[in-house]
């Protein structure tokens, strides 16, 4: 399995505060959401899957089936669904999926196309080959040990010609100093121990 039990345990301890945007342990992810949405929108525009005119609409993702792998408590899944996407949020943590579902049922109308599923990408890909138009791995790959196997299962769920969006920390000395040493250990913006230097990946490694 590509699931790291230690990573699940680490993130589970913050489940109850996941949606505290201002002071919670995931406040950095909440703060990044607008940038992540812009990254996805620009990427889809660059391959002519949406136009500038489409983006003026409130539901410009309405024609896209989207898989958000490692969705946690749903921080990115929710705005994607608000923009019209047909979204599946996938996570191996039952505690985080429970938090995501609680947030969904208390904040949204039943007609929103968003479903949270507690399973692994291995299990999901076995029954959802070539299903999704968009695959999202946002701040996830750096928490995976068996990266190549994990990515293969992810890609298996993507339709031919589908789009993949990955955001992660680059394994550079600067990233270690800023994102790990300063942000986690000095400023306490991100919970200490969230990132391991040896698990970070460079763009070239990711391409290969």
Image: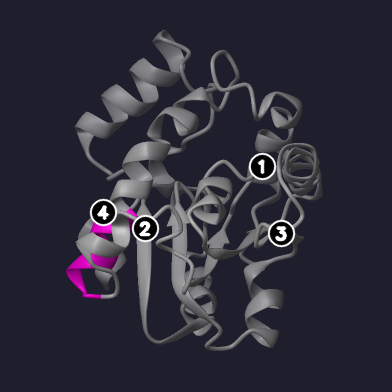
Q: Is residue 13 magenta?
A: no
Q: CA–CA distance between discs 3 and 1?
A: 20 Å
Name the one closer to the observer, 65 or 148. Answer: 65
Residue 77 higher or lower than 65, as above or below: above
174 sits to left or right of 141 = left
Q: x%, y% of residue 14? A: 69, 27
Are the residues at dot 4 and dot 3 in contact (C-beta closer than 8 Å)? no
Are the residues at dot 1 and dot 4 in contact (C-beta closer than 8 Å)? no
- The residue to which callout 4 is attached is 202
The segment highlighted magenta reads 40-48
Q: Quadrant of the C terminus?
A: bottom left
Q: Residues within 10 Å of mark 4 (few under 14, many from 20)?
A: few
Dot label at residue 111: 3
Q: Answer yes or no: is residue 148 visible.
A: no
Going from N to C along the chain, the mark reached first, 1 or 2, is 1
79 sits to left or right of 173 = right
Are the residues at dot 3 and dot 1 in contact (C-beta closer than 8 Å)? no
């Amino acid at each position: 399995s590509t699931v790291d039990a230690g990573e699940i345990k680490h993130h589970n301890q913050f489940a109850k505060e996941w949606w505290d945007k201002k002071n919670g342990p995931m406040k950095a992810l909440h703060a990044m959401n607008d940038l992540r949405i812009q990254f996805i929108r620009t990427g889809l525009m660059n391959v002519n899957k949406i136009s500038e005119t489409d983006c003026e609409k409130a539901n410009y993702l309405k024609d896209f089936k989207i898989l958000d792998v490692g969705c946690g408590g749903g921080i990115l899944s929710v705005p994607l669904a608000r923009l019209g996407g047909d979204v599946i949020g996938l996570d191996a943590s039952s505690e985080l999926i429970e938090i995501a579902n609680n947030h969904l049922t208390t904040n949204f109308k039943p007609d929103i196309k968003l479903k949270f599923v507690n399973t692994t990408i291995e299990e999901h890909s076995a029954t959802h080959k070539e299903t999704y138009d968009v695959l999202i791995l946002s701040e996830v790959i750096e928490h995976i040990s068996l990266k190549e196997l994990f990515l293969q299962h992810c890609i298996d769920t993507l339709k031919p010609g589908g789009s993949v969006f990955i955001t992660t920390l680059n394994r550079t000395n600067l990233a270690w100093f800023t994102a790990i040493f300063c942000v986690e250990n000095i400023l306490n913006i991100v919970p200490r121990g969230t990132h391991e230097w040896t698990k970070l990946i460079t763009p070239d490694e990711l391409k290969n």
